[in-house]
Image: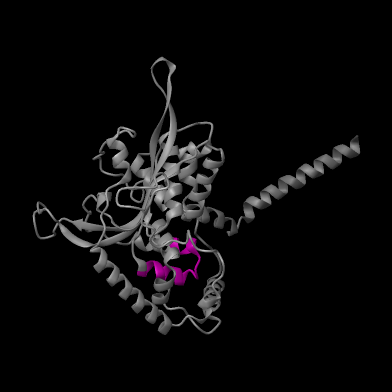
Amino acid sequence: MGYVAVKGGTKAIEESIKRLKYERVHKGSTIEVEKIEAGLRGLIDQVMSESSLYSESLASLAIKQAEGNPEEAVFLLRAYRSTLPRKHVSRVIESEQMLVERRISASFKDIPGGQILGATTDYTQRLLDFNLLEETEEKVKEWLAQFHSEQMEANEESHTTDLTIPKVLDYLRGEGLIAPCENNDQEPRDVTRESLDFPAARSQRLQVLTRGQTGAVTSLAYAVIRGYGALHPTVGELRVGSFPVYVDHPLEDGDDEDGFYIGSIKTTEVEMLMPVTVEKELGKKEIEFEIGYGICFGQNETKAIAMGILDHCLENPDPAYPSHNEEFVLYHIDAVESTGFISHLKMPHYVTFQSKLDAARKTKTTAEKEEVRG
């Protein structure tokens, strides 16, 4: 992790920690972890993704302890993650297995399975809802009862249950408009267990991107679209839903077909379409499409889209743009490393600063003497 060490008098540090708790509870009330888990879905999803740990309850606890500061919450959750034993490795998850809650394409109006809007703020007015000031648990329970009743009726009429839908881009591959994607069965390299080196494997790049600070990933992708990469992508398909997770049965030989189900994880998956000009025979140029891939825990669509843009940039290095330089991108989007390094500037730098100050004084004195001589 980054620069985090602090030195100082024991008594002063104890009082500082006591004051920190005071600032969290000084209004005489506290927010329950269950309330955070119930009402701060977006923040929880962001913290889980940047921490590489899928646990809504632990993310809620970290958010409470960090007083809503996402970088500090990520730091806490990553530190806790480092203490956990690794008992199993899950079986490979195929993205076609997602139980879809939301699914759209900005590239095609009519897609097999249809557009599923799901839960999104895309179609809401960005106006403060003052009715939330009077929202009570009783009103919430009444609304939920009515909502569940309507959902049951709708499901009975449509005869639908969980939705598993084929991928949009598979149809384009079938038409030969997108190059087929070859399987890479190499074991992924884990940046939490070995240092990141360059050139990085794609598994490392994708892991760093999905762990990256949401704002940083979004900003760099925005820079690409504005011109630092001259790229204007389109969302081929965006999905939000749950993946079932299986491991080999701990008491069997691992040859069982179904495996042992341990739960599901909610994720956002995006496949971006990137138009590229390809030179063919006799100097003829054609437009083809390449893919940028993004995936992260929870519903975090902006980050997943931005991740897909940067994934394509890093797959196609270009020295003219920093957004295509994997060292520049991957080293600077990590929330813990970047905030840790910035925060270390608060630590004592007395010796180094005094040496610079002495050098500045000597330079000034020398200049004054030369001026007098002149």
Determine whether 205 is above or below 54 in the image.
Answer: above
Whether residue 181 is visible, yes or no, is: no
* Occupied quadrant, residue 170: top left
Name the image quarter holding the N terminus.
bottom left
- Is residue 354 inside the magenta stretch? no
Who's the residue at 23% across and 49% down the image?
92
Name the image quarter holding the C terminus.
top right
Residue 309 or residue 274, whichever sits in front: 274
Residue 211 or residue 14, whichever sits in front: 211
Q: Position of residue 300 (x, y in %)?
A: 42, 57
Whether residue 169 is visible, yes or no, is: yes
Main secondary structure found in the magenta portion: helix
Determine whether 168 is above or below 163 in the image.
Answer: above
Which residue sits furthest top? 282
Q: Position of residue 52 (x, y in %)?
A: 36, 56
Who's the residue at 50% across and 65% down the image?
69
* Count of number-bearing discs: 0
- Is residue 63 inside the magenta stretch? yes
Q: Is residue 230 left or right of residue 169?
A: right
Q: Position of residue 143 (x, y in %)?
A: 39, 78
Who's the residue at 35% across and 40% down the image?
202
Q: How is the image coloured?
A: one colour
Q: Position of residue 182 (x, y in %)?
A: 27, 36
Determine whether 116 is above or below 325 in the image.
Answer: below
- Which residues are drawn in magenta? 57-75
* Occupied quadrant, residue 156: bottom left
Residue 84 or residue 107, whichever sits in front: 107
Which residue sits furthest front? 157
